[in-house]
């Protein structure tokens, strides 16, 4: 299936979301599309989101946040498709229909939940400038896309978590190696060696892992003797720090 292949190509959640909205305006079809992944919907902008028109989506998001509801919110919270055929005739969603009509060219909205591992993980919304743009065929297409997209997002999220875990482990190993060098070089405790790295990180406004990586690679830490003396606290505990 072309759609499934397209969604399985990206690696990571954000690229997958971008591919979902790109495919969505073609498959449904529609004028604009937006998708997000979140644990819950709030008035704050989702960190994991994609859209075919960022400026328009920002306006829609502000309107939905002010109203405290929208078709997208409802689809996410209820776990079912929400269709607004004509915003001018829509009575649901508080101030949302009126404000969308007044501030955007959107006239028809179709929101479908994205399901992964049996739970709602996000929502896909298609927008049209034409009323009654989404009939049974378009709804079916959107729901099929959402089904495939939910599976792709579950896989992408797992890849992200695995990558983040790998990076964290690599960072910990690098920091551990740097601590080991300081412990051996200055006969410090592990805690004091960590404090040396942290002090250098703060003074130079660099990430701790970056400081550690440079130290492990070069064997040099900027002003390392000063930092060691600083964390030991007194002249009497310098332990051969100064020549």
Image (tube, grey):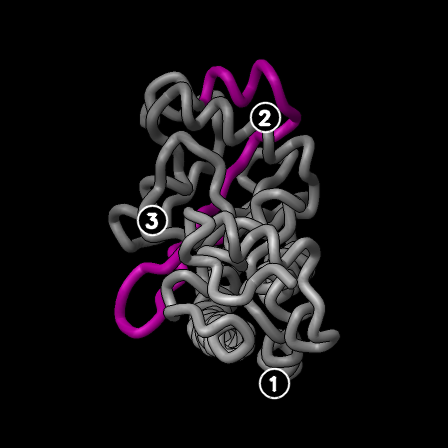
Give the alpha-carbon distance from disc 2 to disc 1, as whole Å. Answer: 35 Å
- Name of the residue lying farthest toward the right: 218
> Residue visible at 54% across and 66% down?
240
Identify the mark at residue 1; answer none if there is no mark: 1
**Res. 215 image quadrant:** bottom right
Q: Which residues are magenta?
A: 97-124
Q: Quadrant of the C terminus?
A: bottom right
Q: What crowding class fits label 2: few (fewer than 14 Cα within 10 Å), some (14-19), or many (20 or more)?
A: some
Nearer mark to the viewer, of 1 and 3: 3
Q: Considering depth in this image, is 231 or 28 the residue closer to the camera?
A: 231
- Residue 73 to residue 189: above or below: above
- Residue 51 to residue 179: above or below: above
Give the alpha-carbon distance from disc 3 to disc 2, as whole Å. Answer: 19 Å
140 relative to 94 in the view: left or right: right
Callout 2–callout 1 Cβ contact below 8 Å: no
- Which residue is identified by label 2? 59
Give the alpha-carbon distance from disc 1 to disc 3, as whole Å. Answer: 26 Å
Query: Which element is circle 1 on?
Result: loop
Nearer mark to the viewer, of 2 and 1: 2
Sequence-wise first label, 3 or 2: 2
- Which residue is identified by label 3? 76
Sequence-wise first label, 2 or 1: 1
Q: What crowding class fits label 3: few (fewer than 14 Cα within 10 Å), some (14-19), or many (20 or more)?
A: many
Q: Where residue 11 sits in the image (x, y, percent)?
A: 62, 75
Identify the mark at residue 197; answer none if there is no mark: none
> Residue visible at 66% across and 26% down?
105
């Amino acid at each position: 299936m072309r759609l499934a292949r397209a969604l399985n190509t990206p690696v990571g959640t954000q690229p997958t979301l971008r591919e979902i909205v790109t495919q969505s305006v073609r498959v449904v079809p529609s004028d604009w599309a937006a998708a997000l992944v979140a644990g819950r919907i709030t008035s704050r902008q989702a960190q994991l989101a994609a859209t075919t028109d960022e400026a328009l989506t920002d306006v829609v998001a502000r309107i939905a946040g002010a109203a405290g509801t929208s078709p997208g919110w409802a689809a996410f919270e209820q776990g079912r498709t929400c269709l607004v055929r004509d915003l001018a005739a829509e009575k649901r969603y508080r101030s949302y229909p009126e404000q969308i009509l007044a501030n955007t060219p959107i006239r028809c909205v179709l929101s479908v939940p994205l399901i992964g591992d049996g739970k709602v993980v996000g929502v896909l919304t298609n927008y049209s400038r034409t009323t009654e743009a989404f009939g049974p065929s378009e709804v079916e297409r959107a729901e099929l896309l959402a089904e495939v997209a939910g599976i792709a997002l579950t896989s992408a999220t797992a890849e992200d978590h695995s990558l983040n875990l790998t990076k964290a482990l690599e960072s910990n190993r690098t920091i551990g190696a740097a601590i080991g060098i300081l412990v051996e070089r200055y006969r410090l405790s592990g805690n004091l060696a960590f404090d040396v790295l942290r002090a250098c990180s703060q003074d130079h406004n660099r990430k701790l892992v970056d400081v550690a990586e440079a130290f492990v690679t070069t064997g040099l830490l900027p002003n390392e003797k000063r930092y060691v003396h600083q964390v030991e606290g007194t002249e009497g505990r310098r332990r051969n720090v100064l020549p």
